[in-house]
Image (tube, coloured by chain):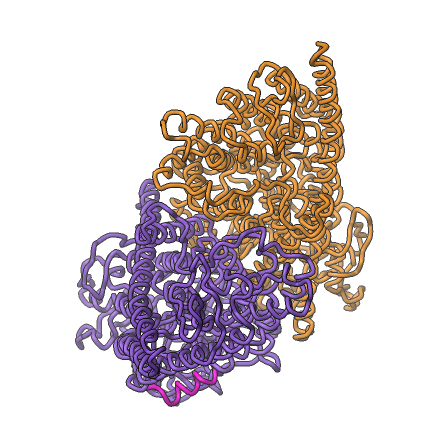
Chain colours: A orange, B purple
Amino acid sequence: MANITKKVSWSSRADESGATGEGTPLLNGSEQPRHSRQLSEGRSIFQIGRLSTVDLEEEITSDEDSLRGRPKEIPHNEKLLSLKYESLDYDNIENQLFLEEERRMSHMGFRCLEISRWVVCGLIGFLTGLIACFIDIVVEELAGIKYQVVKENIEKFTEVGGLSISLILWAVFNSAFVMVGAIIVAYFEPIAAGSGIPQIKCYLNGVKIPRVVRLKTLVVKVGGVICSVVGGLAVGKEGPMIHSGAVVAAGVSQGRSTSLKRDFKIFEYFRRDTEKRDFVSAGAAAGVSAAFGAPVGGVLFSLEEGASFWNQMLTWRIFFASMISTFTLNFFLSIYHNKPGDLSNPGLINFGRFETESVAYNLYEIPLFIAMGAIGGLLGALFNVLNYWLTIFRIRYVHRPCLQVMEAMLVAAVTATVSFTMIYFSNDCQPLGPDHTEEYPLQLFCADGEYNSMATAFFNTPERSVRSLFHNQPGTYNPLTLGLFTLTYFFLACWTYGLAVSAGVFIPSLLIGAAWGRLFGILLASITTTGSTWAVPGKYALMGAAAQLGGIVRMTLSLTVIMVEATGNITYGLPIMLVLMTSKIVGDYFVEGLYDIHIKLQSVPFLHWEAPATSHWLTAREVMSSPVTCLNRIEKVGTIVDILSNTSTNHNGFPVVVQVAGNDEPAKLCGLILRSQLIVLLKHKVFVELARSRLTHRKLQLKDFRDAYPRFPPIQSIHVSQDERECMMDLMEFMNATPYTVPQETSLPRVFKLFRALGLRHLVVVDDENRVVGLVTRKDLARYHLGKHGLEELQLAQT
Amino acid sequence: MANITKKVSWSSRADESGATGEGTPLLNGSEQPRHSRQLSEGRSIFQIGRLSTVDLEEEITSDEDSLRGRPKEIPHNEKLLSLKYESLDYDNIENQLFLEEERRMSHMGFRCLEISRWVVCGLIGFLTGLIACFIDIVVEELAGIKYQVVKENIEKFTEVGGLSISLILWAVFNSAFVMVGAIIVAYFEPIAAGSGIPQIKCYLNGVKIPRVVRLKTLVVKVGGVICSVVGGLAVGKEGPMIHSGAVVAAGVSQGRSTSLKRDFKIFEYFRRDTEKRDFVSAGAAAGVSAAFGAPVGGVLFSLEEGASFWNQMLTWRIFFASMISTFTLNFFLSIYHNKPGDLSNPGLINFGRFETESVAYNLYEIPLFIAMGAIGGLLGALFNVLNYWLTIFRIRYVHRPCLQVMEAMLVAAVTATVSFTMIYFSNDCQPLGPDHTEEYPLQLFCADGEYNSMATAFFNTPERSVRSLFHNQPGTYNPLTLGLFTLTYFFLACWTYGLAVSAGVFIPSLLIGAAWGRLFGILLASITTTGSTWAVPGKYALMGAAAQLGGIVRMTLSLTVIMVEATGNITYGLPIMLVLMTSKIVGDYFVEGLYDIHIKLQSVPFLHWEAPATSHWLTAREVMSSPVTCLNRIEKVGTIVDILSNTSTNHNGFPVVVQVAGNDEPAKLCGLILRSQLIVLLKHKVFVELARSRLTHRKLQLKDFRDAYPRFPPIQSIHVSQDERECMMDLMEFMNATPYTVPQETSLPRVFKLFRALGLRHLVVVDDENRVVGLVTRKDLARYHLGKHGLEELQLAQT
């Protein structure tokens, strides 16, 4: 562990060329005079318990190649906090350039900006809707072909014997699709795996997950989700829509694509974290809205996951994007379904129409619903625990892309085999109704005019299966079918989540829940003699679906609203809320939500809503990183280059201090500057040659920073000659002159609240003379969490 | 204007008894040495343009008797900002006592607190639902009696002639009810007038409106709203529910009633602004939820109006309260309606069921809806402008309670007369349908088996009228009826809002909108030959209602969701949103929303979401109040009493400074203490007699502060003897040791964001040596707003 501290004499440094003491690393960090007039460079004095491994290059170039070779980097222990993630800055960097621009802008200018924000949100909604529509249509078509071929094959061989050929055909079909999906994910863009919701949660929380909002990710995501759904995996296409919406938003709002090397020179004002985050919120909301036909649910999802500061106009814009998205999807799907103008298909999944008469619930059913919530919580916790172990196993042993592809193919084949076996051995025959709601009824060994009811559940896209469980007449399924289906699908879904394919967990959860919920309803009806009138199985299927989904993902208000909107019926609001609340409480008792587990396994420094309740005894002094690398307002280029190149420094923000001229007092804080800003300054050679006292550069503008955003080059790519190293850099214009500060005695909850509410990235801790004593960053706050035995502190790791 | 500045020598003051210079007001505020070692007391140097009138007693005792004699205090000009309102402090005062308590509390303790928060929210929901239920049933019963009597009377006199007697009977009935309602409001609790939504908006925004959440207010509100609705005014009972819910919340959460002098000794932890605000949010949401059967809409209303910082658990609790409230109302109403267990009456108003088939809209209807939005915006703006002038008129001339009662009675009589005249001269007879949906069909001069259609609109509670406009068959109303009805009801409603009765504007707005919307639909159908199939009048009535309501109140997301939830049909989401958006944009072009107008007319320092866009050129230095009255950490009692008693001081918070011992340097900021805390300290005589160096008091606990909350006694009520004046007070334990600070150069938007996001009350401005140079409070920020000609600054006034 490097323990390098540089001695810097502040008084000599501000006015002269600052050569004294520079570049002479001393190995004592404790020699700090009383007035701390010597600040230490290099935040490398890790506190006991923090791990510090080698590849610090990683930190700087994390944007480029981290997460690629996944296994190396993901720690096997969720008790770690990775240092490799950068934070996003949701606080405007109010430097002189920024303020000048804002001051120049007229009232009309701001109004135009506002209008363009609306336009961007409309575009986001439209494109997200289009993507959802594309996915839906392609999946429908491909799955239709697949099921038709397999169905014909099964029908051919049912009489003849030799159904094993059908099985093989089915399994090969599935594996082939899944293989394609897994290859593009595992080899081209591993970040596109899974639903993407954990990643978007992190992004909205303020953690920069590399490559999460890139065009390539979107392409792989869309391709991958089509393949995995058509490949018959126990997955849904809804979760990935949220990620897709976010990528669309990040792309559209920046008015350029770095991947395609196209810059449309529009929306340049939005090229910073603050604005981009707002648009990504809108994109995620549009995604939810397209997936579930739930515009309000989408807005609430974004707010629940992302927003710390509620802003009326922003919310309204997010809602607009959501509405446009669901409308677009609706409109194009209505054309696809040959019913143009019929806007009754609001989302990728909709739960069908619940008639108010048949669904009214009674007061005495509420305890039953709550019991179902508890079951959902238990099953959800079991699901999460199993998936947790599986994920750990995958991190350790299944980390090479080819292994990942093979595992995905295996799961696909097993899914097909299990489904086929279940259908084969089931003898639950049901008469084909006159309305013929089944898309692909398999007759198999049933009598003519009948179909195999197990096949409706397995031989179908999961969305359709959910709908039949909600709406089919009582008596359509027998209890054994449902029980077996629940059991197998539970384990299949659990195995599937976390594969290197892009797919969501919403629909499988709903399906599992709907199955056991319906079972619950049937059993209820059978134990009460007069039961059949009230225990409508469809109603219990819906509650079961809510309970299971709630038990797995543990979302609160947004999930309630999503469920209500997808149901299209407000009557169920209260029971759904009670069910979700119960399942969350029960589930939380055992283990966290699935997304949170995956976030923790990635060691992401995720900030929750509040500081742990029992953390009042901690103050900024204990929490902060110290000593801090500070820069002088007029700093030598060489020093800056050295600091930025120092692989043991991993800060991305540096307090700027100033020496009161002709005064012996210690240096005061006067601003804060980011690594990325310094890099742009170095790249443009914004140097002052003191000897000749002239500027060697053109005046830098905000545009230069925006052009470099968000992929700032690493320091290694910038060449600084020996002469230039002797020049000075005036940071005055570029630093944020009014960073937020707190005194050392501030309690952790107070620091946390400030940090979280304002979306900060760096918070400077000062003493009562306004001298820098430390710096609080996201990692310092995310480190503390409430464990079983009170407050625990996570270890920091470079991995 | 007093311009008093005291010279205080800091160096002599901290250790000695600080007698030098005390009480010798000098008239120069500019004699400030370079290091500002002499801070000035009394923030009385009003900047040019600020008005400062006499009664400053008012400020301190504002809790007691302001707003009582309304006319004196309400300035006639909305370009003023009143100084009489105190702010609420949504930032925890983290002094030593607080931190000690938090540190003592175990993990279990925090969990119990969390549970009691849920219990309180459940109670709030339950009680709010009960109140809604009570209002509804009483109104139904009383209105039923009234309409029955009048109907019989009319029927009696229709044949005989002498309908003028019926008119007089009707008018007398109405006036009598309204008189009772107006008397209790005007004489007992003027704050209960109107819907209470502006007041709750202010409360949630952080402004302490005196007596707004008291039990007495609730009682008067409930009584008042029953009287005004039964009295046949053009009002609704929905708005007041929001206020009622908020009062319930404020009461329940504190575990005591100061009015009833009962203290249940529970929930003492919640006795501070932060916690109370959260509960009041829940109460307001529960109120909306009960009023419209819109639990999600309620949550969004609370968030839109109140929350600045979104917290998942808080939102979930608010949602819980909303759900319980609508459930309670539903449950008891179902019993009242003899259909126990049927939970299909979710709110006081519900728009009835829209069948999905009949309501599907087509793409080409969207421009029509947008046009309706524009009309709604225009009509809404007209409504607001008229009401604005009327309010100004009322402030000037109708300010004595007896005049207010007379005006209310006049309006009631005129409403009855106009209604009667309209019905009398209308010859729009409609056949009585087989389903007989009309509650009180007036035959009047129609043939047998027919009824007067104008009477359905007028001779009915407004809720029923709205529902018939939405759902009656096409052809039920003829265009002339609707046109006349719209016109008269528009002016009646406009005249009514602002009367000294407690009543809301939601229902009248909906009714006006539904009327012209239906008219719009009928006209559309008549100009297109094949129109009758698509232009379902009920659909246009709904859109018209949304447009009109949006044009008047200008709420955004919450209103959309409320409308959708009240409709019970999600299909209408997009058109309702488009309509509301259009009406808001069009309306905002002319004038602000009705609630904002009334808030402005009360000169409340209301903080909007963001600082005005063009305010980047302002910095904390320009914005702050300065000089600031500071206290020493160990301060003489006499000084404190003088400062608090000084009628020209109107600050409620004082920075505490400390002198570095034996050092010649200027004093540094070390904390912040509130007037209310000082008062409690003085009351408990927490003095240190330096001479004998012993404490003369028992150790003060947090409980002492909580017992005094929120009605702290005025300084005048506390007697301090001459001996005690010479004692010292050690503020160390009681001051907030880590107040938020900003440097002087911070731009206004940045200050604003910090202030608003954290819900601050005082923000200390310091120089780069951490010395106090100014204080930013709510009034300093609310002062700047964007007018027609760019940034404008409001004047501050004591009135």
Vertical relation: A363 (above or below) A77: below
| Image point (20%, 67%), residue name | B685
For the residue pair A288 and A184, the one nearer the viewer reads as A288
Q: Which quadrant of the figure contains the C terminus of chain B?
A: bottom left
Residue A674 is drawn in which quadrant? bottom right
Is B638 left or right of B4, judged from the image as shown?
Answer: left
Q: Is residue B394 magenta?
A: yes
For the residue pair A730 and A388, the one nearer the viewer reads as A388
Q: Position of residue B390 (x, y in %)?
A: 44, 84
Vertical relation: A706 (above or below) B638: above
The residue most toward the top is: A161
Residue B639 showing in the rendered view: no
Type of secondary structure dominating the magenta stretch: helix
Q: Position of residue A755 (x, y in %)?
A: 51, 54
| Image point (61%, 18%), residue name | A423
For the residue pair A254 and B515, the one nearer the viewer reads as B515
Q: Is residue A656 magenta?
A: no
Magenta stretch, residue numbers: B388-399
Is B306 left or right of B689, judged from the image as shown?
Answer: right
Q: Which quadrant of the figure contains the N terminus of chain B?
A: bottom left
Residue A104 is drawn in which quadrant? bottom right
Q: Position of residue A90 (x, y in %)?
A: 59, 55
Q: Position of residue B392 (x, y in %)?
A: 44, 85
For the residue pair A587 and B620, the one nearer the viewer reads as A587
Residue B201 showing in the rendered view: yes
Is B673 left or right of B524, judged from the image as shown?
Answer: left
Vertical relation: B751 (above or below) A452: below
Vertical relation: A522 (above or below) A299: above
Tally the numbered discs: 0
Is A632 left or right of A377, judged from the image as shown?
Answer: right
